[in-house]
Image (cartoon, rainbow, N blue to C red):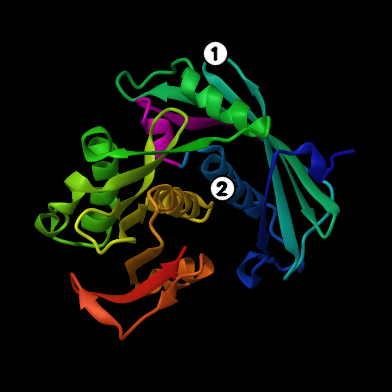
Amino acid sequence: MTRPSDFSFTHRLRVRWMEVDAQQVVFNGHYLTYLDVGISEYWRAVGLPYPEGIKHEQGDIFVRRNTLEYHAPARLDDWLDIGVRCERIGNSSITIAWAIWAQGRLLVTGETVYVHTSLLTGKSSPVPASVRQQIESHAQGAPVHRVVCGAWRDMADAARAVRIAVFVNEQGIDEAEEWDDDDAGAVHAVACNLAGLPLATGRLIHLGQESGHAKIGRMAVLRSTRGIGLGDQVLKALMDEARSRGIQHLSLNAQVSAQAFYARQGFKPQGEVFDEVAIPHQRMTLTL
């Protein structure tokens, strides 16, 4: 019998009205859409957010075959649990086994075969070792990301890539306003997958601050990998770095949309909301 415990990853979603057919059950074709959502979340959790995670190795993946077996119907407002696991990695293929349950009732089982393709030749190519490592590490319950702290001279390329993607390309901030003299003296944290793809960053400014004080800033996480805790890992690394330097007080200017994230880590708002680079911000502080 297929059980949720047989799968290394599970994603939950709810059946919507538009997905129910005239028979008052989910139309059979929607299960492939559910599967696509589940597999997208699986790649994110594995440390291979699509498309950056695969294209980092100059490749992409395409569906070669889908098989489905229906066991029971889903209905409006059912909560669906989509289980996903990598069944096999061949030379150029990745076989994914999957299943969907509603409140513990097995609905659908299936298998999807992907073919890894070179972006340079447009033809099938061997699955890169780095992709295999990410999948295997996740299956074994091992970390699929790492956070490294260092000086700007060592971290600039990785930190710059994330900041350009988030602040310049996504939020529309003028690149001339993104770089300043504080980068050179700050401690930078970068979260990467095991292949070294930078996914999140932040910095700790301690030089030129009052004694025992430091400022956290330039916190950014790629849109494709948000929601899996990388921001928490980067912030924790910077807070640990501050403690190691004897810093007792931290401050930051949080974008208002991210204020709740910092509040969960104990930061408290101070003063009124203000605009910085045309985005509402809130000053927040924390005593370590």
Taking the image as shown, residue 37 lies to the left or right of residue 3, namely left
Q: Is residue 228 magenta?
A: no
Residue 31 lies, in percent from the top left, at 66, 51
- Asked if residue 258 shows in the view, the reply is yes
Marks 1/2: CA–CA distance = 24 Å
Q: Residue furthest bottom?
A: 272
Q: Which residues are magenta?
A: 50-66
Q: For label 1, count other residues whose C-alpha is less than 10 Å away and answer few (under 14), some (14-19) or many (20+).
A: few
Name the residue located 65 percent from the left edge and 72 percent from the top edge: 17
Q: Is residue 197 above or below residue 34?
A: above
Residue 252 lies, in percent from the top left, at 33, 66
Q: Which residue is mark 1?
A: 91
Q: Amino acid at mark 2?
A: Glu
Q: Amino acid at mark 1?
A: Asn
Residue 279 lies, in percent from the top left, at 25, 73
Name the residue located 81 percent from the left edge and 42 percent from the top edge: 5
The secondary structure type at the circle numbered 2 is helix
Q: For label 2, count other residues whose C-alpha is less than 10 Å away and answer few (under 14), some (14-19) or many (20+).
A: many
- Asked if residue 113 shows in the view, the reply is no
Which of the pair 265/275 is nearer the observer? Answer: 265
Residue 46 lies, in percent from the top left, at 56, 38
Taking the image as shown, residue 225 lies to the left or right of residue 216, namely right
Q: Which residue is mark 2?
A: 41
Which of the pair 247/131 is nearer the observer? Answer: 247
Q: Quadrant of residue 109?
A: top right
Q: Is residue 184 above or below residue 28?
A: above
Q: Give the mark toward the camera: 1 or 2.
A: 2
Name the residue located 49 percent from the left edge and 18 percent from the top edge: 129
Name the residue located 64 percent from the left edge and 64 percent from the top edge: 19
The secondary structure type at the circle numbered 1 is loop
